[in-house]
Each structure stands twice: as structure tokens, then as C-alpha cells.
Image: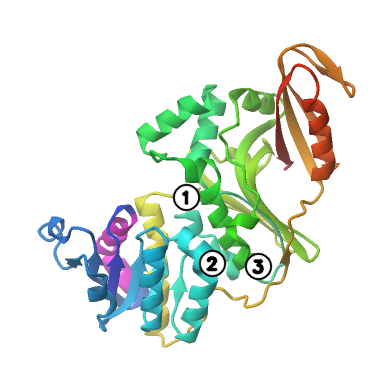
């Protein structure tokens, strides 16, 4: 049986998951691919901690010892970070090695360049795990949905924020209370900024947009707003109105343009995304012929993410065993849409907190928080309305949420 040797860069949560799946399911994987997949070497900071615990793998802290090994044909990068990972992946591709990565930050920042290097060297660069963890979303997007005009993508792509918002809604707790619990359970980092401010979701949105439309949008060009200002009062008002609040990464096509944003939405309880609870993720894709589909599952974790990584490795091994022509993962070399910073008309829910009773524009503002709605309004018009509310004596806060109906 043909053997494909793997160099594993990183042996943490995901890397160890890759090892366990390849080991536990070895016989099944060999039957399906016709190839024996063997991890030859693994990059770790302290090799001595692993040498006596796991046999059959050479652990090293020298990345060149792995990248320069001519017998290794596939590199799996699960290090995280950008600069060092970029140098490793770039060198591997230029050396004629196939690469599988789960690194969303790397791909959001350098995906176009790395994909071009892969094309030039006739090797695979696969990264299914970078957006949905264990959810297969990228390959369906570039294969199954490629014959459609994609109209919109809405995604719950960050498990930390979804856990926090679900807990706040179902338990009536504050953001601060739930964040502490999430950190204790390991669902949130000690520094949760990347998650709660929407940065993590933005990186994933960049990748989704590039695969769906061929449009490369920079991180700074995407408006983003996290969940730190969402209150339990907002969630209560949403529930009473038939909605819940979710942090959504969205890209919506409008003619020849696409608009991207990451922010909390009022999501109708009748929408499938409203049912996605706690650390689970889901991506809704709407095509002109297909209609709406929902891809749902575990968006993070050792074995869910490793499942997508191993699936990519198996795909490469199968194609190589068949001597198939290398086909780039990113099929679009030219953008089908251009990025716009002008938001399309949409519905908004506005929460107004007051300290004393007021009436403005026909809306009674009692000594509490109230919810008002605007339908198919531009951002400029909405800003005028909100500015007027903020000028009223007694209005303490105004929070804006786009609305996603079923």
C-alpha cells in the first residue's frame, strides 16, 4: 500500500486530535483512500515531553527538520498565529509539499498569496477547518453551490459569543456574569477580545467571501461590532418581540456589489439560526436556485476541528493515489462582485433606555428600556433618527440591531 508521510506542525488541541483520529481510524481510512497516512514528524516546543509517551513519531523543535524532509509529502499546520505559520506554509508549498491548515488568521491575511504559490507549484492548499471547525462549509460552497449565484451568507461562526448570548438569554444573566462562567468552562480565553469584539468572526467572513465571490476584502474594511454592549434587557425585549440576539458574520450580494459586516442581529425565532445554541456554530447560505441551506455543528474543539483537517488530508491522499490533476481549492481567480461600504436598506430594531418618561416622534419612552422598529431604512437615515433620540433629555443609551427575518 502506498504511504503518504505527514509533517505535523503543532501538537496541541487540534494537532493531538489529528493524531488520535488517524490512529484510531487507521484501518477505515486506509480502506477509503487506498493510502497509509503516517505522521512522521511533529513540531513542538519541548520534544522531550512527548518522546516517551507517543511512539512512531519524531518530535522536534526544529521546523526545518520537518520542512526539508523529502519523504514528507503533506504538511499539516495547526500552530495558530500568523507570521511564523506563514513562513512555514510558504516554504512547504514552494518545496512542493501539499498543505492542510486550520489557521483562519493566516488565510484571512495571506490566503490569496498562498493560494497563488500553491498554483505555481502544482500542490494542494486545503483549509476546510479554518471557518466552521468540524462543519463542512467551504467545500460545499466551492463545489455544490458553485453553479448558483450566491445571494447571502449569514453565519454564527464563533462559539464563545454564541455561548455567552445563549446563556444570557436563557438564564437572564448579565454579559459579565456569563463571560466569567465561559472562561471557567474553557469556552472563552483569559483575554476574550478577539471573540467578543467580532475579530475572529471577521477573519472567517473574509474567507467565506473569497470562496463565494472571489472578492478579497481586508480586515479593516469590514465594519464590526461585538457583543460587549448587549444587555439582558435587550435579550428580554427581543424575546418578547419574537426574536433572539445572535452575533452574525454576513455578506449580502446586491447587484454587482457585496456588503460585509459582523455585528449582533435581532434574529426571528422562526429562523433556523435562532435555534443554534451555546457553543454550536451554523452557516446559512442562500443561492438563487438552491434557496437557503443551513450547515450546522461544532465549530471548535479538538476532535471536531481535527475531523475537518483529516478529511482534507484524506482528500489529498486519494487524489494523489489516483494521479489526479491538482485542482486549486479556490476556484475563482477573478472577483465576481466588488466590495461596497454602503449598507443595503434593511430593517432595524432600536433599544432606547430612558431615565424618565418622554414622548418623541409618536413613541412613548417610559422610565425603562423600550424597543422601536424601522423598516427598509438606510444607515444614514437611521443615524439621523438615533441622533434625534440621543438629544432627548433622559435618554441614557440607544442600541441598534439589524433584523434578520425567517
Please check the rendered image and state whether residue 148 is part of the magenta-colored stretch, yes or no: no
Residue picked out by circle 2: 139
**Closer to the N terminus: mark 3 or mark 1?**
3
- In the image, residue 125 lies at what x, y percent? 45, 74
Residue picked out by circle 1: 299
**Closer to the N terminus: mark 1 or mark 2?**
2
Tally the marks.
Answer: 3
Alpha carbon separation for disc pair 3 and 2: 17 Å
The secondary element bearing badge 1 is classed as loop
Q: Are discs 1 and 2 less than 8 Å apart at CB?
A: no
Q: Which mark is nearer the camera, 3 or 1? A: 3
Alpha carbon separation for disc pair 1 and 2: 15 Å
- In the image, residue 192 lies at what x, y percent? 45, 40
The secondary element bearing badge 3 is classed as loop
**Closer to the N terminus: mark 3 or mark 2?**
2
The secondary element bearing badge 2 is classed as helix
Label 3: few (<14), some (14–19) or many (≥20) C-alpha neighbours in 10 Å: many
Residue 1 shows in the view: no
**Magenta region:** 14-31
On-image quarter of the N terminus: bottom left
Q: Residue at x 35, y 53 (%)?
A: 303
Chief SS of the magenta region: helix
Amino acid at each position: 500500500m502506498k504511504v503518504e508521510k505527514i509533517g505535523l506542525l503543532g501538537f496541541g488541541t487540534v494537532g493531538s486530535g489529528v493524531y488520535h483520529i488517524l490512529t484510531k481510524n487507521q484501518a477505515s481510512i486506509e480502506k477509503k483512500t487506498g493510502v497509509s497516512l503516517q505522521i512522521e514528524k511533529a513540531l513542538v516546543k519541548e520534544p522531550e515531553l512527548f518522546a516517551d509517551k507517543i511512539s512512531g513519531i519524531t518530535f522536534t523543535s526544529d521546523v526545518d527538520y520537518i520542512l526539508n524532509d523529502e519523504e514528507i509529502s503533506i504538511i499539516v499546520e495547526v500552530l495558530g498565529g500568523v507570521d511564523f505559520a506563514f513562513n512555514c506554509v510558504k516554504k512547504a508549498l514552494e518545496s512542493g509539499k501539499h498543505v492542510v491548515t486550520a489557521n483562519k488568521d493566516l488565510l484571512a491575511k495571506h490566503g490569496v498569496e498562498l493560494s497563488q504559490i500553491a498554483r505555481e507549484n502544482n500542490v494542494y492548499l486545503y483549509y476546510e477547518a479554518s471557518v466552521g471547525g468540524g462543519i463542512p462549509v467551504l467545500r460545499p460552497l466551492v463545489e455544490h453551490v458553485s453553479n448558483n449565484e450566491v445571494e447571502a451568507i449569514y453565519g454564527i461562526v464563533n462559539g464563545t459569543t454564541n455561548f455567552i448570548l445563549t446563556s444570557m438569554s436563557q438564564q437572564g444573566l448579565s454579559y459579565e456574569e456569563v463571560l466569567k462562567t465561559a472562561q471557567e468552562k474553557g469556552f472563552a480565553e483569559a483575554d476574550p477580545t478577539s471573540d467578543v469584539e467580532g475579530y475572529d468572526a471577521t477573519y472567517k467572513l473574509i474567507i467565506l467571501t473569497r470562496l463565494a465571490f472571489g472578492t478579497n476584502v481586508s480586515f479593516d474594511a469590514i465594519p464590526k461590532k461585538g457583543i460587549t454592549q448587549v444587555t439582558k434587557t435587550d435579550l428580554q425585549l427581543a424575546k418578547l418581540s419574537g426574536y433572539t440576539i445572535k452575533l452574525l458574520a454576513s455578506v449580502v450580494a446586491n447587484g454587482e456589489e457585496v456588503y460585509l459586516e459582523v455585528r449582533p442581529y435581532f434574529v426571528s425565532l422562526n429562523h433556523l439560526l435562532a435555534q443554534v445554541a451555546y457553543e454550536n456554530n451554523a452557516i446559512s447560505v442562500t443561492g438563487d436556485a438552491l434557496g437557503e441551506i443551513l450547515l450546522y455543528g461544532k465549530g471548535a474543539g479538538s476532535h471536531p476541528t481535527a475531523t475537518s483537517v483529516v478529511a482534507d488530508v484524506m482528500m489529498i491522499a486519494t487524489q494523489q493515489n489516483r494521479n489526479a490533476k491538482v485542482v486549486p481549492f479556490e476556484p475563482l481567480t477573478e472577483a465576481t462582485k466588488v466590495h461596497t461600504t454602503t449598507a443595503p436598506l434593511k430593517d432595524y430594531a432600536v433599544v432606547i433606555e430612558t431615565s424618565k418618561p418622554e414622548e418623541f416622534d409618536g413613541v412613548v419612552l417610559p422610565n425603562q428600556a423600550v424597543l422601536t422598529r424601522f423598516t427598509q431604512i438606510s444607515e444614514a437615515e437611521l443615524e439621523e433618527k438615533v441622533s434625534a433620540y440621543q438629544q432627548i433629555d433622559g435618554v441614557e443609551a440607544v442600541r441598534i440591531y439589524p433584523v434578520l427575518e425567517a
